[in-house]
Image: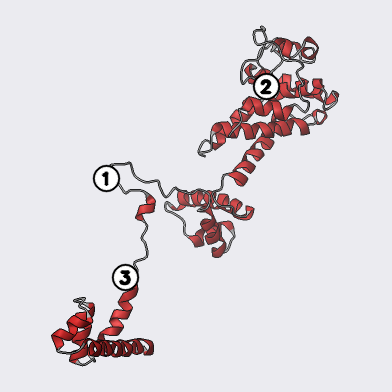
Amino acid sequence: MVAPTGELLVSAAAPTADPFGPAAPANAPGAAGPGRTPGPGTGTAAGPGLRDLLPPELAAVDDPREVAPADARDLTRQLLCRLAELEEGTREYSYVRTTLVEMNLSLVRFAIRRFDAHREPKEDLLQVGAVGLIKAIDRFDPSLGVEFTTFAMPTVLGEIRRHFRDTTWAVHVPRRLQELRIALARAQERLAQRLDRAPTVAELAEHLSLTPDEVVEGLTAANGHTAGSLDGGGPEGGDGPGPLGEQFGTDDHDLALVEDLVTLKPLIAALPERERRILSMRFCEDLTQSQIGARLGLSQMHVSRLLARTLGQLRDGLEDV
């Protein structure tokens, strides 16, 4: 089950058991509500000493996620410099780190817009992107003079792409084929616009400097990205096809008899008239040996010997063929 994003941020951004100090009573003015991550504006949960770590513009904000992106950029720069001065593992470090994560979640939301075409739940992508954001905060060096968003965006996107690569394929395929699938999709789109038709395997191979066999391998691997349900199909009661599983054919065991019947036809035609009649009465009319003997004026024992000899001849004829 997917954990709420707030729980993810608390568990990932807080190395200590309770970095925000003792929890405030449920009826306290600044107490955090259900599912809400404690932040700088949550009253006694943060504590006056921890709030002093924040810039004045942010200390009075109830929820860091409500800070405008334009203001968040400057405040982020100040908090990253403050984070670099704190000792990792302390309550102060965890508090500033969590505030940075919450304040920059808008960056994650912006990043996951690129993946709107995917069917992955947005909440899952938000959690994965938040993990990338936390990694970017931990790895960022403010002394290099680089904008945090410039550094963080590739990290967040990389974490999301890694999520798609490792967890969203219905069938596991090598990473080489996963990347080839993406390259083929882009090449197909470009060539289709240029040629005004679907490109052939040879055209894709020439465009990507690959062999036709490699292109075919990549196209085949792309089928493993998603899997349909055999129980899926048209709407119930509709005129469309039913579940996909019911549309598949099954082995027809009677077809295996066709070859034997074709082979037996000339063998039976070569039998004497009496033996042909005995076979017809026994296997077509389903008569007993006694009934066959009564019709032909033979004893049951005689019919049994004739039937056994005739079947032996046919069996030998099938083996010789």
Where is residue 117? Give x, y as percent.
50, 38
Mark found first going from the N terminus, 3 or 2: 2
Please state which of the two labelled residues, at mark 1 or mark 2, is closer to the viewer: 1
Asked if residue 38 can be seen in this view, the reply is yes
Horizontal side of 17 relative to 233 (left or right) equals right
| Type of amino acid at the residue the image marks with label 1 | Asp
Q: For the residue labelled by badge 1, is the local secondary structure a helix, a strand or a loop?
A: loop
Spatial separation of the CA atoms under disc 1 and disc 2? 53 Å
The quadrant in which residue 214 appears is bottom right
Residue 282's place in the image compared with 49, above or below, is below
Q: Which residue is mark 2?
A: 103
Q: Which residue is mark 3?
A: 254
Horizontal side of 189 relative to 242 (left or right) equals right
The quadrant in which residue 160 appears is top right
Q: Nearer the viewer, residue 153 or 314?
A: 314
Residue 142's place in the image compared with 274, above or below, is above
Labels 1 and 2 touching (C-beta < 8 A): no
| Type of amino acid at the residue the image marks with label 2 | Met
Q: Which residue is mark 1?
A: 239
Q: Nearer the viewer, residue 307 or 226?
A: 307
Labels 1 and 3 touching (C-beta < 8 A): no
